[in-house]
Amino acid sequence: SVSYEAIRENTTDSYIKTIIDNWYKANIVDKNLGLTLKKIYNIKISKYLTKAVTTNALGISTTKEFGDKVTFAKLDVKDINNLTIKVIYTIEVQNTGYYPGYVSAINDYMPDGMSFNKDYEENKNWVLNDNGTLVYDGLKDTLIKGSEKKYVTLALDITSKEAGSFVNYASVTNDDIK
């Protein structure tokens, strides 16, 4: 063990020496102050296009697989007025911290020109709020350990009959992390 005198004599900063002297004089040497390190729990959200399913007026479907971690894709369609298009996303939830924790909700911000169908298998545990935000609570009871990843799916229909881009993103807030 290191003595008070050794700590004080090996410290060059006078401010630190004053603090050490005051601690010693207040007789709080070797006392448990109940201080702990703050446990850091960080979440990273990544969202990828998984596939698109186009169905024509005759009910014939074509699936376009996008591969691994695609964030932008282009669909070539001839007659958008006679098609339905279902886009399936994968949301990757990763704990980038050391300590385990929970994500009580994932928020998805559906863009104009897309719609949510609660009956799709991919949309289990998703709810559309009155403000148009989709909320997923399927991980609320799942402990996510440090460096661990969990995956969530979401399917949206393209309802716009005009060509264009759709920017869809997901997030968690500090209130959603426990």
Image (tube, rainbow, N blue to C red):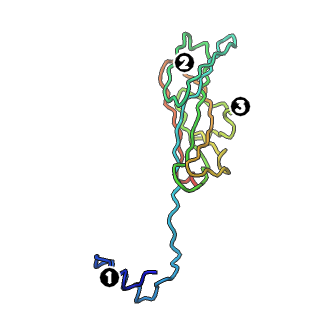
Label 1: element kind = helix
Kind of residue indicated by mark 3: Asp
First of labels 1, 2 by sequence position: 1
Neighbor class of circle 3 (other Cα within 10 Å; few <14, some 14-19, many 20+) is few
- Tell me the CA gap for discs 1 and 3: 72 Å
Kindly identify which residue carries mark 3: 119
Q: Residue 160 bears which disc, if any? A: none
- Tell me the CA gap for discs 2 and 3: 22 Å
77, 158: nearer the viewer:
77
Q: Where is residue 130 in the image (x, y as percent from the top left)?
A: 60, 41
The mark total stands at 3
Kind of residue indicated by mark 2: Lys
- Where 79 sits versus 7, above or below? above
177, 97: nearer the viewer:
97
Kindly identify which residue carries mark 2: 161
Q: Residue at x 65, y 39 (%)?
A: 126
Circles 1 and 3: CB atoms closer than 8 Å? no
Q: Residue at x 51, y 58 (%)?
A: 40
Q: Where is residue 53 in the image (x, y as percent from the top left)?
A: 62, 20
Q: Residue at x 33, y 77 (%)?
A: 16
Query: Which of the 4 image quarters holds residue 58?
Result: top right
Kindly identify which residue carries mark 1: 9
Q: Nearer the viewer, mark 2 or mark 3?
A: 3
